[in-house]
Amino acid sequence: DRAECAICFEKLHSRKTCVFTKGISNDRSDKAPRGWVRVCRHFFHLDCANELLEAKCPLCKASFHTVAAVPSPEVDAELWFDIVDYDCDGTLTKQEVLDAFEAQLPLDMKRLEDTLDKMWSRWDLDGSGEIDKKE
């Protein structure tokens, strides 16, 4: 079972993915240093999202301003981390990582979940349950 684009219903990992974002006001800039936040947890094909007639997530109806391509972590690890960090707290939870991997990679998700549970402590050096950019 693989994640599908909710617009075209094809496998997400088959094409470049994206998320929806919006700019933030200056009083919240410490929470999102890049000046934007994701509006929802959903991933879509970039080309499908660019064809939407209305700037609302087709699943949860959250309004957005920008369609942000999700880079490969091998190409731009810092931007990948920032995009995957849905709540802009500077850390990634297992769920945030699983959501991104499911969208970008053709993996057996049950097996990935089991493997990630076993390997998480290798990345989560401080034992907080989350990983940050230093870890």
Image (spheres, rainbow, N blue to C red):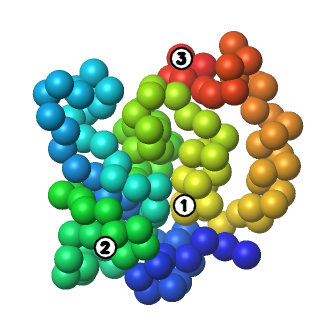
Relative to 3, is 57 on the left or the right?
left
Q: Which residue is the site of mark 2?
A: 49
Decide which of tag 2 and tag 1 comes sooner along the chain.
2
Checking the image for residue 77, the label placed there is none
57 shown above or below 123? below
Residue 80 visible, this orientation = no
Could you say which is closer to the camera, residue 65 or residue 133?
65
Amino acid found under the numbered disc labelled 2: Ala
Q: Which residue is the site of mark 3?
A: 134
Amino acid found under the numbered disc labelled 3: Lys
Q: Does the CB distance between marks 1 and 3 fall below 8 Å?
A: no
What whole-number distance in Å separates the C-alpha atoms at marks 2 and 1? Answer: 15 Å
For the point 15% across and 34% down, the residue is 25
- Label 3 vs label 2, nearer the camera: 2
Decide which of tag 3 and tag 2 comes sooner along the chain.
2
102 shown above or below 13? above
Could you say which is closer to the camera, residue 11 or residue 23?
23
Q: Secondary structure at mark 3?
A: loop
Q: Secondary structure at mark 1?
A: helix
38 shown above or below 109? above
Q: Say which quadrant the C terminus sits in.
A: top right
Relative to 114, is 94 on the left or the right?
left
Give how far across and how far down residue 98 sits, in percent.
Answer: 64, 51
Q: Residues within 10 Å of mark 1 (few under 14, many from 20)?
A: many
Q: Does the CB distance between marks 2 and 1 fall below 8 Å?
A: no
Relative to 108, is 69 on the left or the right?
left
Q: Which residue is the site of mark 1?
A: 104
For the point 55% across and 69% down, the residue is 13
Q: Residues within 10 Å of mark 3 (few under 14, many from 20)?
A: few
Decide which of tag 1 and tag 3 comes sooner along the chain.
1
Give how far across and how far down residue 9 sits, in percent.
Answer: 51, 85
Q: How many marks?
A: 3
